Amino acid sequence: MPSTRVVFFRHAQSEFNARHSIQGQLDPPLDETGLEQVALAAPRAAAAHDDAVAVFSSDLRRASVTGRAIADALDLALIEDANLRERHLGDLQGLERASLATSVPSAFKVWKSRDRNAAVPGGGESSAGVDARLSAFFQTVSTGNYAGKKIIAVTHGGVLGRLFAGGANREEKRLCQMRRGVGNFAECVVDAYDDGTWRCHYSGWASGRFLEDSEATLQADDVA
């Protein structure tokens, strides 16, 4: 089955990342460090993937600002897609991570649950809902003009967590034994198929290679 190579990036550091607050589908901007990350890493990412034919991003601005910088470096238009949004985390959104277990215990329990169909209280989304959005995105980019080519997509830590969990090639996943968080501007590569499934390249998952020599901090994933 032919595939489309999708090079995912997590957005650069936002104001909520810096203060360890849960974002979900709230829309805080990048902070000063995040803008520094974009200025340094976006041209490097574009140079490494100069054969990409399109750049997509979540429509939340921490992702779209990151994606637009990569698109500009490639002289491509940015395509915003709500299917790439972070998981809606309901009552958890806007709260400091350290307080979740005591301030909203029911929502925190669902967030940490392995039940894919459990939606976070307060209008939140289930993991299965995120997976469905990803499948829809992959069906879109695996047909038509993008089929068999390479695209770039900028998204969020929780979405990358779902990609990691749901991808095929399970033996490579077992051997990779990734324990680190997905840092800001981390790179994750996926092969997408027109039936909505995907195969992760686990061996290089969450690479921070485009910020390796930077003083800009790499925040750990706040929604994995």
Image (cartoon, rainbow, N blue to C red):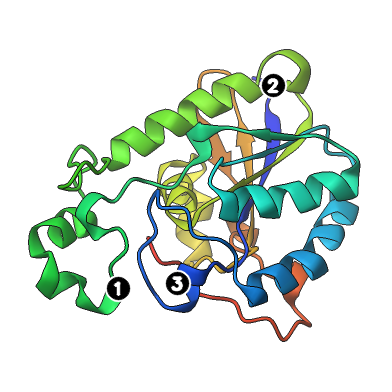
For image coordinates 68% across by 52% down, the residue present is 65
Please state the horizontal and vertical placement of residue 166, each as a whole percent of the image: 42, 42
In the displayed structure image, the side of residue 49 where residue 35 appears, left or right: left
Q: Identify whether 119 is placed above or below 217.
A: above
Q: Which residue is mark 3?
A: 179
In the displayed structure image, the side of residue 45 where residue 16 appears, left or right: left
* Residue type, mark 1 in image: Arg
Please tell me which of labels 2 and 3 falls first in the chain: 2
* Residue type, mark 3 in image: Arg
Closest to the camera, between mark 1 and mark 2, is 1
Quarter of the view holding residue 30: bottom right
> Element type at marker 3?
loop
Q: Which residue is mark 2?
A: 2
Q: Quadrant of the C terminus?
A: bottom left
Q: Identify whether 102 is placed above or below 132.
A: below
Nearer to the camera, 91 or 146: 91
Q: Identify whether 13 is placed above or below 199.
A: below
> Element type at marker 2?
loop
> Element type at marker 1?
helix
Residue 135 in view of the camera: yes
In the displayed structure image, the side of residue 56 where residue 105 appears, left or right: left
The answer to whether mark 3 and mark 1 are in CB contact below 8 A is no
**Few, some or many residues within 10 Å of mark 3 (<14, 14–19, 20+):** few
**Which residue occupies the extreme bottom position in the image?**
215
Quarter of the view holding residue 138: top right
Please tell me which of labels 1 and 2 falls first in the chain: 2
* Residue type, mark 2 in image: Pro
